Amino acid sequence: MTTTFTAVAHPNIALIKYWGKSDEELILPASPSFSMTLDAYPTTTTVRLDATAAEDSLSLDGRAAGAGQRARVSAFLDLVRQRAGRRERVVVESRNTVPTGAGLASSAAGFAALAGAASAAFGLDLDLEELSRLARRGSGSASRSVHPGFALWRTGDDAGSYAEGLDAGDLDAALVIVVLNDAAKAVSSRVAMRATAETSPFYSAWLQASNDDLDQMLAAFEARDLDGMGQVAERNALRMHASMLGAVPPIRYLGADSFTVLDAVAALRAEGLTAYATMDAGPNVKVLCPAGQASRIAEALARVVPAASIITAGMGPGVRVYSG
Ligand code: 2P0
């Protein structure tokens, strides 16, 4: 029997954000989120069973991972072992092409790939719903990277909270990703969303507004109305950042360059282009646009932030698992 499996997963960018949990241990979101899985920055993770090892080992890009990362991955693997009724330790090797911890969703691709490879290695035959639920326990946003294209991650209890894939039909969408700074962030999303929920007077307003934003996003998505989707996405991202700015102490991921890009995106809209910005737990800006406008938008943004690295991503595949 093969005991080595490899999985490939891609990051996703939320157009309606996940920012806050109703349950920290089960990683249940306080509000629903909606995302696009990218066709860029894949993470490839191999899991090999090692019946003789006393503990799990983890390498990231060829280097042994630190104790904190190893503990987080081992705790996740314990969930898989428990479910499979197995005890073997494993060797995990992961290669990540996205800058880790820079607000570019590295944990989403990472835990989606780990969920795929580990569940296969331990003989679990999970459908996408079950795989999404499992990936969620590693990192909330990973629940969405299981799916290709667009996904909706609903609130619920442990059984009810998973992402479902949505049919994008003939929707024409791309994201121009403006990487202003690829250094790891000072405050992790996990810590920052907890601090926002505990200390920001704007947090309850954020939850209410984001639920309303989702309804409008889904209506625009059903109508294949990219302008409508973009308007809601940009507003939702700014509302998430506004909730963090109200935390004590304030959490500020956006920098001066982020606002320079936001101004440039507004100027492109004034010229008639379909371009809307979204920002996650970092200064980088992702611009939603039709694929046919992406190169013009990327060129315009390169002129205003010449030090940035800019790539364009389209709709990507869901997690794929291979034997070996
Ligand atoms: C999102 N982010 O919806 C939001 C927007 C960052 C900003 O999901 O604690 O790394 O592991 O569940 O998934 C980042 O949060 O947090 C995130 P955990 P995760 O994409």
Image (tube, rainbow, N blue to C red):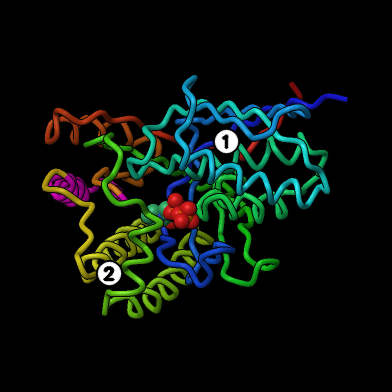
Residue that carries the numbered disc 1 in the rendered image: 9
Whole-percent x, y for residue 23 in the image:
53, 70
Residue found at x 19% / y 64% = 250
Q: In which quarter of the image is residue 181?
A: top left
Viewer-closest of 16 and 282: 282
Which residue is at a point 61% across and 72% down the rendered structure image? 156
Residue 32, relative to residue 119: is it above or below? below
Name the residue: 26% across, 79% down.
Answer: 201
- Quadrant containing ligand 1 reads bottom left
Residue at mark 2 to residue at mark 1: CA–CA distance = 30 Å
Quarter where residue 89 is shown:
top right
Residue reaching furthest right? 1
Depth check, front residue: 69 or 10: 69
Percent from the top left, x then y, of residue 219?
49, 67
- Where is residue 267? Give x, y as percent: 15, 48
Amino acid type of the residue that numbered disc 1 sits on in the rendered structure: Ala
Secondary structure of the residue carrying tag 2 is: helix
Disc 2 designates what residue? 243
Numbered label attached to residue 73: none
> 314 or 182: which is nearer to us?
182
Residue type at numbered disc 2:
Ser
Q: Give the range drawn in magenta.
A: 258-281
Q: Label 1 near label 2: C-beta < 8 Å? A: no
Label 1: state its secondary structure.
strand
Residue 85 inside the magenta-drawn segment: no
Q: Give the crowd class for mark 1: few <14, some 14-19, many >=20 residues within 10 Å.
A: many
